[in-house]
Image: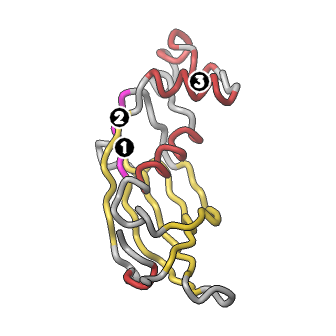
Amino acid sequence: MRYFDELSLEEEFLTPARTMTETDVVMFAAMTGDYNEIHTNAEKMKDSQFGGRLVHGLLALSVSHGLMFRTAILDGSAVAFVGIDDLKFLAPVKIGDTVHGKITVKNLVPSRSKPDRGIAYFQFELIKQDGTVVQSCVKKIMMIKKP
């Protein structure tokens, strides 16, 4: 576990990796009601510019958040997910792609009202197995300071 006051600007972390599966896409479509054919019609998408179905962008974003919490950075020190800034979908993720995250500490803002915590700004890049950055954003996490 890392506490807010143990982080350093520009410090970098890598998350574990995860392969995006057919089951992920089917369950996400069912949960959200997003049955767009770009995600659900294999026949139509095999002849598309992508050569196959794509993982929902918001599914990949959700997975990125899960990967972030699988690192030792936030386990036990995160209080709340405060927001997300500058979200960019840069390249498609296909079923079968394996993704991981690169996290860089970009800003640390101590709380003015609660001296035991602060907001950490993490630049997050979601990266495919071939090195392509598919998503980027800044995730803002409220974290506690070391007791």
Q: Is residue 16 above or below residue 31?
A: below
Quickly name the residue at label 2.
19
Q: Was residue 19 drawn as part of the magenta stretch in this picture?
A: no
Which x, y percent locates residue 52? 46, 21
Dot 3, how many residues are within 10 Å of its Cα: few (below 14), some (14-19), or many (20+)? some
> First in sequence: mark 2 or mark 3?
2
Q: Amino acid at mark 3?
A: Ile
Q: Is residue 133 above or below residue 30?
A: below
Quickly name the residue at label 3.
38
Q: Quote the CA–CA distance across marks 1 and 2.
A: 6 Å
Label 3: which secondary element:
helix
Which x, y percent locates residue 115? 59, 89
Label 2: which secondary element:
strand
Which x, y percent locates residue 147? 44, 84
Q: Is residue 11 above or below residue 20?
A: below
Asked if marks 1 and 2 touch (Cβ < 8 Å), the reply is: yes
Q: Residue at x 37, y 82 (%)?
A: 6
Q: Amino acid at mark 2?
A: Thr
**Viewer-nearest residue: 15 or 1:** 1
Quickly name the residue at label 1.
99
Asked if marks 1 and 3 touch (Cβ < 8 Å), the reply is: no
Task: Answer with the quarter of the image where residue 94 lies.
Answer: top left
